[in-house]
Amino acid sequence: MCLGIPGKVIEIWDESGTRMSTVDFGGTTKTVCLAYLPDMELGEYTIVHAGFAITRLDEDSANETLRMFADLGILEEELGTA
């Protein structure tokens, strides 16, 4: 992924001392590293770039951004689901 895509954290686990998560991007899930946001919780939304959660955001902002990317026709390309 090149753009910062927002997604919802749906699973968190420890992998050799690094917090990892499964993040849902409107139906597509990816494995994401939580090293930069070690206090992320289940159900929170984050911006993901290059496989790393880089910032936390609210659900409304996340959904608005996902809709905008989908409307522009770039969401599937960025998520590798095209």
Image (tube, grey):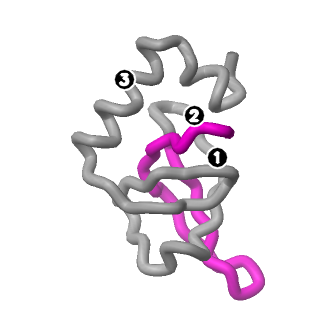
Q: Residue shown at 36%/33% (left/top)?
A: 65
Q: Which residues are magenta?
A: 1-24
Q: Tell me if label 1 and label 2 are in contact, CB under 8 Å.
A: yes
* Disc 3 target residue: 67
Percent x, y of residue 61: 27, 42
Give 49 or 18, whichever is nearer the viewer: 49
Q: Amino acid at mark 2?
A: Thr
- Up-down: is 28 above or below 49? above
Q: Amino acid at mark 1?
A: Lys
* Disc 2 target residue: 28
User: Quarter of the image containing the C terminus?
Assistant: top right
For residue 30, the mark is 1
Q: Residue shown at 47%/51% (left/top)?
A: 47
User: Quarter of the image containing the N terminus?
Assistant: top right
Single out the residue that lies furthest toward the right: 16
Looking at the rendered image, the disc whose residue lies closer to the viewer, 2 or 3, is: 3
